Amino acid sequence: MNSKENETLVASSFGKLPDHLLIEIFIRIPVPEWSQVSCVKKQWATLFREECLWQAALDRTYPSASRAKRWPGPIPRGLSRRRYEALYVSRHIFAIDGELDEIVGHAYLFLKEQLQRSTVLPPSGILHGTLIDQFIACGKTRDVAHELASQIWLAVLDNLEENEHTFLILKRLAQEGDVFLPYPYTRSIKVQWRVFEKLLTDFRDCFSHVDYYDVLACAKSKFQPIPSAWLGF
């Protein structure tokens, strides 16, 4: 029996299994392979869109999540898939354990989606303020809220795809006018630095001559001295 016949036999055998057994198998497969598995059959793709699979994955991988209470604040918790994604982000991007796991993951997903999907990007002060309000609503101090929000900004900036849309987002963030906001609603210096760092190193080839010097002037108005690596169009 050749490999193609083997694949056909395996697919046929799996196709006879009821959905609840398929779910138990799928949630034991490494997460990075889920997208490939869901493409094998239409039935499997449907399972990965349904709440029952994500609830089973949530219960198996993060059993304490079922005991987590809903929290106040502007960022909703969502259904099982959203909760699983938030917990996965918290563990694998932030390496955080404990009560903040899910909240940090949801805040990360919220900010990343706002930056990636918005045709009209909200002012960064509004996005940052939403993160701050979420953490303060959950009982965190202003200092802790500010530090968590800064970590989330840095992680999102580092995980955006390198494409034209990201370039335009970063340029918009770099050229935003300074607006006075009380602490902790101001973005941290390290977040502002990362915006310019990515623009003037990773995306330098995307600039026109005029835009490059406009952004460089903005950088010089905020930071002195600026790194030599940012110089030279």
Image (cartoon, rainbow, N blue to C red):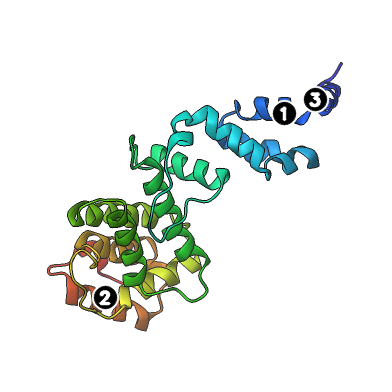
Q: Note whether residue 41 is visible.
A: no
- Rendered-image quadrant of the N terminus: top right
Q: Residue at the spot x=61%, y=29% of the render?
A: 27
Secondary element type, mark 1: helix
Q: CA distance from mark 1 to mark 3?
A: 8 Å
Q: Is residue 33 left or right of residue 198?
A: right
Callout 2, which amino acid? Leu
Residue 230, image quadrant = bottom left
Q: x%, y% of residue 23? A: 68, 30
What is the crowding at mark 2: few (fewer than 14 residues within 10 Å), some, or many (at least 20)? many
Q: Mark 2: which secondary structure?
A: helix
Quarter of the image with the C terminus is bottom left
Q: Amino acid at mark 1?
A: His
Residue tagged 1: 20
Q: Nearer the viewer, residue 189 or 221?
A: 189
> Which is more toward the observer, 176 or 210?
176
Q: Position of residue 162 (x, y in %)?
A: 46, 59
Mark identifier at residue 17: 3
Give left or right: position of 30 versus 158. Answer: right
Q: Which residue is painted at 48% across and 57% down in the image? A: 161
Compared with residue 206, is residue 75 higher up or lower down, i.e. above or below?
above
Alpha carbon distance from label 1 to label 2: 57 Å
Label 3 crowd bin: few (<14), some (14–19), many (20+), radius 10 Å: few
Going by the image, does 183 lie left or right of 129?
A: left
Q: Residue at x 38, y 68 (%)?
A: 170
Please state which amino acid type lies under the numbered disc 3. Answer: Leu
In this view of the protein, can residue 148 be seen by the observer?
Answer: yes
| Of callouts 1 and 2, the N-terminal one | 1
Q: Which mark is residue 80?
A: none
Q: Look at mark 2 in the image and give the residue it sits on.
A: 216
